[in-house]
Amino acid sequence: MSGSTGSSTVTVVLVHGAFAENAGWTGVISRLAQNGVRAFAASNPLRGVAVDSRYVADRLHAVPGPVVLVGHGYGGMVITQAAVAAFNVEALVYVGAFAPETEETAADLATLYPGSTLRGNVVATPLSSGESELTIQADAFPQQFCGDLDAATSSRLAATQRAVLGRALDEPLTTAVPAWRTLPSWFVYGAADRLIPAAAHAHFARRAGSQGTTRVEHASHAIALSEPDVVTRSILAAIAG
């Protein structure tokens, strides 16, 4: 890939997952800027894989030059489909994220290996449409989502979490060829992730033929917040190719 730290022509586009929002990328964005890399967070609608990936692809079409596309959690579902519809994505980085095969869902992949404790800690809020939005119970959020962060930060994240439409987690990847089959990919994840088990992350990386896999002991699902230096290094590796 063209470009190097300090003079990169690449733009990094970051996509958050369920129960998160754009501010979760703040530390990574600031570190990328220190390395001369342009980056911005694309708000994930959290309405479903098809809708969300279409929106992100639209954002990608407006970016001049090559893109490294980064996804966190459920955002991995979205980038895997969005990158197929975009012409300028040159690499993918999965940050504690799902990397699905065609027809796989986030709900299926979360339980592919034992260890996820999400199901018992989710609250469903009915909508007038007849569907429901899901959030993580506030008292369970720190342990479930960000066990390696301080109490004040954990409470703030619980209060600002974005709800995900229930069916989004049950909606499969529909693209015929997942983007990680044709694009180089990098993976970074926490061994203490309680949403997506570490064994699942390792499986995704092996299956995708990861160019570089980083496992961070004691890191939670909120690895971009707790370990921004490590996540940034993975993204810089993807830029350097």
Image: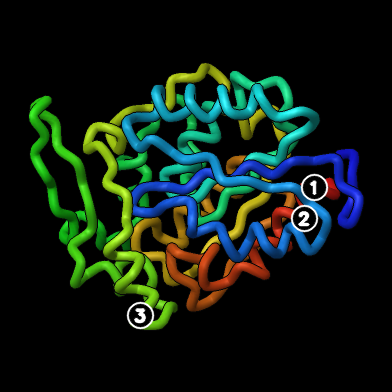
User: Mark 1: few, some, or many residues within 10 Å (few <14, many ≥20)?
Assistant: many
- Residue under label 3, please give it: 152
**Residue 68: horizontal and vertical position, in percent?**
70, 40
Instruction: Identify the disc placed on residue 239.
Output: 1
In the picture, which quadrant includes the N terminus?
top right
**In the rendered image, is residue 144 in sight?**
yes
SS class of the residue under badge 2? helix
Q: Earlier in the sequence, mark 1 or mark 3?
A: 3
Q: Position of residue 82 (x, y in %)?
A: 55, 27
Q: Is residue 222 above or below residue 93?
A: below
Q: Which mark is residue 59?
A: none
Nearer the camera: disc 2 or disc 3: 3
Instruction: Give the residue at mark 2.
Output: 236
Residue 73 locus on image (x, y percent): 44, 50
Inter-mark Cα distance, 1 to 3:
34 Å
Query: Secondary structure under badge 3?
Result: helix
Q: Is residue 80 above or below residue 7?
A: above
Q: Is residue 162 above or below residue 60?
A: below
Q: Is residue 128 left or right of residue 71?
A: left
Q: Are marks 1 and 2 in contact (CB under 8 Å)?
A: yes
- Residue 154 place in picture, x, y as percent: 35, 73
Q: Residue at x 37, y 44 (%)?
A: 109
The amino acid on which the numbered mark 3 sits, given as a three-letter code, is Ala
Instruction: Name the amino acid type tagged 1.
Output: Ile
- The relative height of residue 67 versus residue 120 in the rendered view (above or below) is above
Snapshot quadrant of residue 119: bottom left
Mark 2 closeness class: few <14, some 14–19, many ≥20 residues within 10 Å:
many
Rendered residue at 65%/22% (across/down): 61
